[in-house]
Amino acid sequence: MYDTDNSNVITNLTEHTIQGEIKRVVYETDDGGYSVLRVLDGSGELHTVVGPIAGAFEGQGVEITGTFQTHKEHGRQLKASSYKYVLPSTPDGIRRYLASGLIHGIGPKIAECIVDKFGIDTLNILDNYSARLTEVPGFGKKRLEMVRKAWGEHAAERDIFIFLQGLGISLAYCRRIYKKYGDNAHVFVKADPYKLAEDIDGIGFIMADNVAGSLGISGTDVRRLKAGVVYTLNKLSESGHVCYPKEEFLTYTAGLLKVDEAEALNGLNNALNDGVAVVDFLVGGENITEGEMVYKTQLYTAEKELAFLINRLSSITKHNNQKSHNVQFKSYMQLSEEQESAILSAGIYPLNVITGGPGVGKTTVVGDIVRRANVAKLKVYLAAPTGRAAKRLGESCKRNAMTIHRMLKWDPQKRNFVFGTKRPLKCDLLIVDEVSMLDIPLALFLFRAIAPGTTVIMVGDSDQLPSVGPGTFLMDLILSGKAHVTHLSRIYRQGMDSRIITNAHAVNAGRLPDLAPIPKEMTSDFYWIEKDDPEQVIADISKMVSLRIPQRFKFDPMRDIQVLTPMNRGSCGTKLLNDTLQEQMNPSSGKKPFFIFGEKKFRSGDKVMQIRNNYDKRVFNGDMGLLIYIDHKEKIFNVKYQENVVKYDFLEADQIVLAYAITIHKSQGSEFPVVVFPLLTQHYIMLQRNLLYTGMTRAKKLLVLIGSRKALSMAINNINNEPRFSLLRQRLKML
């Protein structure tokens, strides 16, 4: 870490300007707020440059103005006050510039050949005398045309790229901006840099705000305030809120933007006028919300439409699964009263919810409902939010099941689902599993595609964590009175022998699980390992995943074992665990291809996860796969998922993360043969009963909890979950 403490430096106040090329980016913060560069000037002197220089890369030409200072530890440095990017002016700089990946089709080998021939005159040759490239050994007509075309395309972009980089925008995002806006990119960015957050994948408000600051846009500019309101709404949505109380919203927005609440209100009013936000206040009925609620417009319309669709479906008196009551049918299993009630209800009510914890017979009930429907010759669709959940549902019912996205069928040309209001699904009975994962937007897409008269059965565990996306759909549906709800509670004999199931139910009831050690000569499906030291916990997890569990229980470490943790950050968060497990389970070798994206290194053979929906690629948030192919020449890589192989550009690597360890939130809807779950007091922010319960119930055959009893008790005793604001329940009750 570099020292930015001014007490350690002696500064010469005379300003100097140096022009040269970046030899090395020594250090750079994530936001570009502070960088340390080695810059070689025209006379051959190497300077250390420090300051807020963003978007730099090796080989880039740069002109920097600042004051020289002497640091007690790091020596003489130029502290930058301003900078701009220029073309490099030395053979070495030109070589690195051409080989940087900035110019499609020109890689390190071609760059070296050209610069070896023309030296400092290379850029002039490429601009004005490209026919002379045939003087380079090995350059035939085909290669000449390829390089000429690549350089010609780059020439149109070059000045725009230099302008954008001067605003602190990295090379990767320069490309995305140019692809979106073309030759007028600089015009669009100058007019409203906050549009970048709306239009460019991966650019958020913070980056756009930094660009705006570089353009001299003030903190109270109306464009910033309006964009800041959208930013606040997006952050709240990421935290699970569909809407937010207006007064608290203004306070939160003002804090994020570092303005007063009057300016935040000005931003909100402009967002309302532009139609990107809505303020609503329900009155009448059983409304329990007091005060106005602020919505992002898309979520407001989604919540209203979803309430209408659910009410319409539940109000129908004649529905298709009523036919299953008239068939002769004998169950394979001895059913309890509550199970029989759930099966009968599926033939009486058009909209049903079947809920309960692990081992209570939800699978048995769903299987019997499907078999009755088959005898009645009804068309049955089975679906779940994730591929793993869909596969599990299909196996239990012995028929095909799909993810919701696949069932609705995305059309990349129209950028919408094929099945919806105008073209509903053609089925008599629809069963959806893992419904606790449904957020408001996905629930809306699903209910749009359900034709009136279809019988719908929603299956899920209402005690698990709510969806990653906004809303509390399952709980709202249960409490609204619009669906018939069967809560299965009896644990069956096959579950009584499972310590995973009995301990999960104990946690859900607020009791400590059975932590008794297992004799060495015996095996169990649940183990507790008491450890307080985070470093020792990581070391133990690494050994368990790579050696101990595979050797003793014969599970495949890559396919069967999943590490779940409450947080991303911290010494037992996903970041450090993934770095450790990657080295243990997929170590580097001279022959193994890899590429680096920001701070992340990906290798062929890595276990990875998609972290946001990409409808065009048909891969979705939470999908897990293996990185199977890397091509540096084409700058692409392939990931093999359960249902397909997906090709990515290197620049799309921000859509995936290593998945040797994932958060419990990301594990929702999935089930793994083996789960290893660290639980430490450093996770205190996230230690909640429903999080612990959700993580435990992801394990199918073996669960290892490792951590401290104090952390375990903290999680079990913490039932004060952060509230999620939504008015879906109230809207349903009013209809």
Image (cartoon, helix red, strand yellow):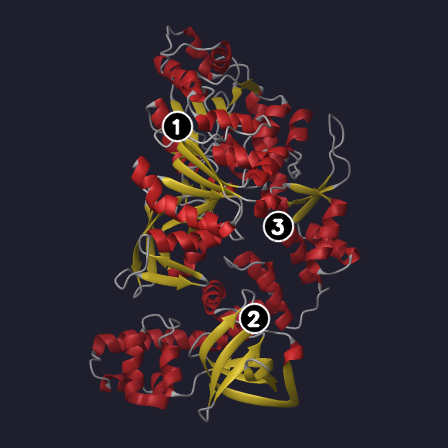
Question: Can residue 163 be seen here?
Answer: no
Query: Residue 697 appears at what percent x and percent y?
Result: 47, 32
Q: Which of marks 1 and 2 is nearer the N terminus?
A: 2
SS type, badge 2: helix
Q: Which residue is drawn at 51% across and 59% down?
A: 200
Label at residue 393: 1
Label at residue 681: none
Single out the mark in the foreground, 1 or 2.
Answer: 1
Question: Can residue 370 be seen here?
Answer: yes
Q: Of the residues shown, which amino acid type is indicated by label 2?
A: Val
- Quadrant of the frame with the C terminus: top right
Instruction: Please tell me which residue lies in front, 639 or 11.
Output: 11
Q: Earlier in the sequence, mark 2 or mark 3?
A: 2
Query: In whole angstroms, how far apart are the C-alphas of marks 2 and 3?
Result: 29 Å
Judge whether 155 appears above or below 272 on screen: below
Q: Which residue is most to the bottom?
A: 43
Judge whether 554 appears above or below 634 on screen: above
SS type, badge 3: helix
Judge whether 248 appears above or below 49 on screen: above
Residue located beneath label 2 in the image: 187
Q: Of the residues shown, which amino acid type is indicated by label 1?
A: Leu
Query: Residue 119 appears at what percent x and percent y?
Result: 33, 89
Single out the mark in the foreground, 2 or 3.
Answer: 3
Q: Of the residues shown, which amino acid type is indicated by label 3?
A: Lys
Q: How crowded is mark 3: few (under 14 residues within 10 Å), some or many (20 or more)?
A: few
Residue located beneath label 3 in the image: 235
Query: Residue 508 appears at what percent x and percent y?
Result: 56, 28
- The part of the image, by quadrant, that contains residue 604 is bottom left
